[in-house]
Amino acid sequence: ASLEAKVRERSAQLEERNRLLEEQNQQIEQLSLLKDQLISTVSHDLRNPIGSILGVSRLLLSLEDLRKDPEQMTGLVQQIHRSAERMFKLVNDLLDLSRIEQGMPPQREVVNLRELLSQQVESFQPNFQAKSLQIIFEPPAANLTLTADATGLSQVFSNLISNAIKYTPQQGSITVSTQMQENRVAIQIADTGIGIPSESLPLLFTKFFRVDNPNHRAEDGTGLGLAIVKGIVEQHQGQIQVESEVGKGSVFRVVLPLDPTLNSF
Ligand code: ADP
């Protein structure tokens, strides 16, 4: 009877091992699928701007008359410039994301939140004006500081504000405000833009995810911005939340822990 028990035990162990192996195989298959998807998305997103640079530069090289016409020349060089910028953004976003995904710890320095947010809001003034958007800025207290990666946090707010601008029609308004919550601070970026369908909300922070929108061509963005935002916020032990209503607007909220040794509450 004891031999029988041993055999049973052994076969149960083998079964368990097979199950684990099967699970691992499935994970490997899934990762390989993800990798294929990544390669095809990136090559597609790089192919279009490279194609445009090649085509336009070929035109400029072959047509001497074109080069003599400053207006046409400027238009074509601008087209090359836009395409190169698009590729540069994609490659930079990919590098940022890969750094975040590798779990590199963020730089830590003392950051004044009011200054950081003011700088971001200020840097977008030309974009607000270009679309006649009203900007309402309710900054935090002047002495509120966090230990954080200043470059990373700037990128978080820059991505959120530029999305708010991009997805808000002319004459809309964007509000950047802050609220204190015990030992945390919540920074809200609210817009009166096109909003996000509720079924897209759970996928919003996934890399390469973009809401199908007939008014925004795929080349307007990389679909990596919000994945980077989430990565950086989580590096800081913070949270990112979103609420949105189609046709009304969206609210993105970044909640960051405050260092009690730097601030008295
Ligand atoms: P993208 O480069 O496409 O802007 P993001 O990761 O920043 O990539 O955003 C992913 C998608 O989320 C966007 O394509 C857009 O559909 C949607 N989105 C992001 N922010 C907003 C917003 N403020 N209002 C409406 N839709 C938004």
Image: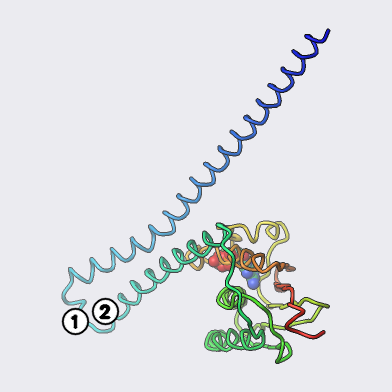
Is residue 50 toward the left or the right of residue 113 in the image?
left
Kind of residue indicated by mark 2: Met
Q: Residues within 10 Å of mark 1 (few under 14, many from 20)?
A: few
Kind of residue indicated by mark 1: Lys
| Residue that label 2 marks | 73
Let me know if residue 220 appears in the view: yes
Element assignment for label 2: helix
| Percent of width and height locating residue 167 | 60, 73
* Picture layout, residue 118 above or below residue 210: below
Q: Residue at x 35, y 74 (%)?
A: 81
Is residue 61 toward the left or the right of residue 191 in the image?
left
Task: Indicate which disc residue 68 carries.
Answer: 1
Tell me the distance, in whole angstroms, between the alpha carbons under discs 1 and 2.
Answer: 8 Å
Q: Residue at x 56, y 67 (%)?
A: 225
Corner quadrant of residue 137? bottom right
Is residue 150 toward the left or the right of residue 8 in the image?
left
Between 85 and 130, the one nearer to me in the picture? 85
Task: Indicate which disc residue 199 carries.
Answer: none
* Picture layout, residue 212 above or below residue 189: above
| Percent of width and height locating residue 232 | 61, 67
Check whether the beta carbons of the residues at disc 1 and disc 2 lie within 8 A of each other.
yes
